[in-house]
Image (cartoon, rainbow, N blue to C red):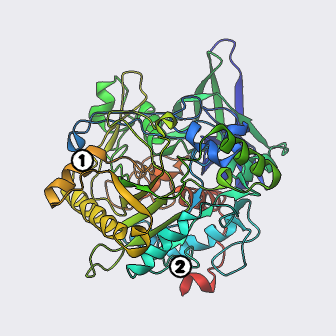
Amino acid sequence: MDGSEAFEADYIIVGGGSAGAVIANRLSEDGASQVLLIEAGGEARALLVQVPAGVVQLIGNPKFDWLYEQQPDPTIGNRAFAWSAGKALGGGSSINGMVYVRGTRRDYDRWEQAGASGWGFTDVFPYFLRSESWTGEANQAHGTHGPQSVSPMRPGFHPLTHIFLEACNQMGIATLGEYQDGRMEGVFLTHGSQRDGWRCSTEKAYLRPARTRSNLQIITAAEVDRVDFEGKRATGVTFRRDGKMHSARARREVIISAGAMGSPALLMRSGIGPSAVLAEHGIEVLIDAAGVGANLQEHPGVGQNKYVNRPTMNSRMRPVDIIGYLLRYAWNRTGALSAPAVPAMGLVKTRADLDEPNIQFHFMPLGYDMDPNATSWDAKGLPREQIITLYASVCHPKSRGQVLLDANLRPRIVHQLFGDERDLATLVDGCKLIDELYRTPAMRSLVTANRVPNPMPSTDAEWADFVRAKAALGYHAVGTCRMGIDDGAVLDPQLRVRGISGLRVADASVMPTLPSTNTNATAIMIGEKAADIIAGRAPPAIPAAAKA
């Protein structure tokens, strides 16, 4: 460590992503607590990050995306994906599709039933409100004074979106005017993590206003190698920056917020994890914790696209179209460049006897070609044809995977999207429901021919073959440092690493089970609640809307 610089703070936060940025803001707002935030990625102020349509150049871009390696998955023909995670301040909120959705009431009540006491819907709802600055019409489902800007769809979103909603209505699926209150069965126009048409990441919402505080220090391009301990108390971290190793000492706590892949990997590098995995890499075991890296969950999904008789985003990609989009966005931040990646979605049941939705629908006024063996999404795969896509994903996957370490002690993912064949059966049912949706009068007036799949499957076995060949990730990895009270839980409900003092984890990895929908709003909520827990503050009052 000769020549290295040493740092000291009350709290050290490892990772400035969707949750870590929130925690850094909230712990430093008292003006007294010294907070050090260490982020492996860089800044998130590039124009590509700020413009919503830039998402197509961010996911799969190694400058902004970790692209974690996955072992080939035998349940999808030995295909393998690079699992995306934000590599910049703001984390996933800086590279995602900006869809803001919280999930259902039962998603969080399920956490509490699994042993995460204090994390039921009525407990977490006030933290969603605290985080949010809603720009639409006021109602009790939204907060208005939080840092995180959330907006309804801006003018100029694609007109075919309304045909999707009409088709759903013709199938008996209601259009919801509001979906952030936890009642989500139906379809809706999405809300976006946006401010005046720009992306609003947690870097913009939480860190920028806090960076003038003398008690908050942010270090970027610094990768934490391990947590340091005295006995079984976390005392700080060791990190690498500019080719040099540095130490940082925590007077109170270390909070790991490196994401569903990064957080378990850091725990394992620090000697906390399955003893066999640690021994394989020559890491001394501090705590034999089999749950570290286990319980990995993702939303498997698959799309069907069709040729249509009206212009879509694909067919309007000529230079003159691009210039028009740019001019409109520059003028008033509306139009195609301002929309979230998915303008409409919803939750539906594939069978009437189900007691909650099991499939999430997504409508996209475009289609893309993705090599089944590709390891990242390629924007160059956008064909110049009139195509729309309806996409289905499994709300509550039963399959579980694991995060391990590779030879360089970085995350290595072992996951089978259909390790539990119930997930395959659910997605087959979801595909058949989309096929039915395409047969509604509204869609028949639009669709001219099949594209993918073509020909259409006619049996469940053929649908299953299609799903295995085309299924993809939802970019919603969670669960690898889950909280609970059973022996397999990594954390207690206060987010403390079991068997260790002075160390917590707070990010998507702590979720016991995957919410029905996109996970970024949930990660922000976790940051808000974690900050109160760490600081010893009383939780906010539960509003009447949460009890309805």
Residue 446 higher or lower than 286, as above or below: below
Residue at mark 1: 468
| Residue sitting nearer the eye, 93 or 513 | 93
Work out whether residue 418 can be spotted.
no
Dots 1 and 2: beta carbons under 8 Å?
no
For the point 67% across and 50% down, the residue is: 337
| Residue at disc 1, secondary structure | helix
Dot 2 falls on a residue whose secondary structure is: loop
Name the one closer to the observer, 116 or 193.
193
| Residue nearer the viewer, 526 or 356 | 356
Residue 96, relative to residue 523: is it above or below? above
**Residue 51 coordinates in the image, percent (x, y):** 69, 45
212 w.r.t. 69: above or below: below
User: Dot 2 corresponds to which residue?
Assistant: 176
As shown in the figure, which amino acid type bears the numbered disc 1? Arg
Q: Position of residue 45 (x, y in %)?
A: 74, 38
- For the C terminus, the image quarter is bottom right
Q: Along the horizontal axis of the image, is 518 left or right of 462?
A: right
Q: Residue at x 30, y 27 (%)?
A: 279
